[in-house]
Amino acid sequence: MKKAIVLLSGGLDSVLAARLMLQQGIEVEAISFVTSFCNCSQAELSANELGVRLRLIDIFAEIMGIVKHPKHGYGKGINPCIDCHALMLKKAKEYMLETEASFVVTGEVLGQRPMSQQLRAMEIIEKESGLEGLLIRPLSAKLLKPTIPEQNGWIDREKLLDISGRSRKFQIALAKELNINKYSAPAGGCLLTDSMFAKKMRDLLAHIPDPSWHDVQLLKLGRHFRLSDKLKIVVARNDEENKRLLSLLEKGDVMFMVADQKGPLSVCKGEINRQQQSAAAAITARYSDDKGKSGIVMSNGEGKEEVLSVQPMDDVEIGMLRI
Ligand code: SF4
């Protein structure tokens, strides 16, 4: 029995690809990537439903290197999809060798995504990953060159599919037929494709060339304002974000909050002077229910506190500082 490593995002296409391999008697082991930009919990649900083992591989450091300098450019956000796919497949190849599997499988569909799933891009990705001939895309296989597993008869090409394009009608019908119910939305919700997130990421990279996991987590919440090259303020949008922001506090951060506690928590990261303290308090007041009438408490998180009296910053000025 041959074994395949399937890249499982938890999206419908990757689940179908895995199922098509299982139907052909192939032993399947799934891998999914922890990037900090996508949610991999769906992959775990799908692996359970498929009854296959799942290995999570953390590629945060490598993907950040690619986000900074993508050889093949970005998509509509700051998503370096061609380089990112090639990286994932390189990792899949390493895992394939380590586990003595025979080939790698993905749920890619020819022509489905404008950047990474065009024929030329798919060829580049296959070549750069070092998986030439050993990469099966079962959903579009009949439209692509026969691979080594097909040529060697490990899998039957006739039982593979010829799907192309962006419509998902065929996949949804097939999922019903195969009784597959648990799968996530297309694209897996990668934050790098989101234009608002991309703006914040570009600002981060312009000011911190080597951001940490922690810096990236902060981008996922709140409103962000740049007060100088060395200072940013993040303002939480609701109670849940207040809690998350508090959990991401680091030494040296300065907090601003409404004196009566009804309002957002704001956190300044970086070097802050007196004028910027007032600006941060004015921004916090702008988003508080009482517009800062009860005062804004500035705290270093280590017991040193001061109450600032400020007017809420006006929307024009706020708009100029917003990232
Ligand atoms: S959508 Fe995100 S995770 Fe997927 S290939 Fe593109 S950059 Fe990578």
Image (cartoon, rainbow, N blue to C red):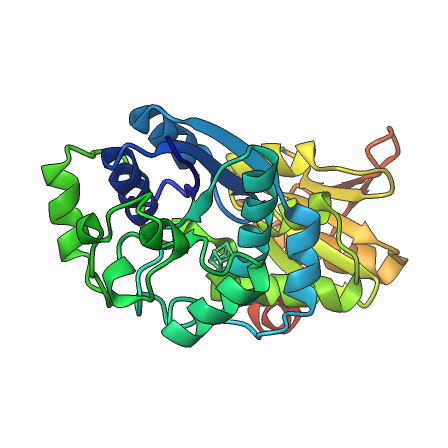
State whether residue 53 is above or below residue 197: above
> In this rendering, would 281 be left or right of 117?
right
Residue farthest to the front, as pictured: 152
| Viewer-closest of 291 and 41 | 41
Up the image or down, 175 lies above or below 198; here it is: above
Query: What percent of the width, then of the height, locates residue 258?
Result: 65, 40
Q: How many marks?
A: 0
Q: Quadrant of the C terminus?
A: bottom right
Give x and y (percent) for residue 223: 58, 55
Q: Nearer the viewer, residue 269 or 163?
A: 163
Does residue 90 lie above or below 97 as drawn?
below
Q: Front-most of 186 and 295? A: 186
Which residue is pictured at 87% across the width and 42% down the height?
Answer: 252
Q: Please say whether residue 54 is visible from this viewpoint.
A: yes
Residue at x 55% of width, y 51% of height: 88
Give the residue displayed 49% in from the left and 40% down from the top: 32
> Residue at (25%, 67%) from the top-left corner?
143
> In screen coordinates, is 317 left or right of 7?
right
Q: Position of residue 250 (x, y in %)?
A: 80, 38
Q: Is residue 263 visible?
A: no
Q: Nearer the viewer, residue 26 or 320?
A: 26
Q: Position of residue 167 (x, y in %)?
A: 19, 63
Q: Quadrant of the N terminus?
A: top left
- In the rendered structure, the answer to whether residue 155 lies left or right of residue 179 reads right
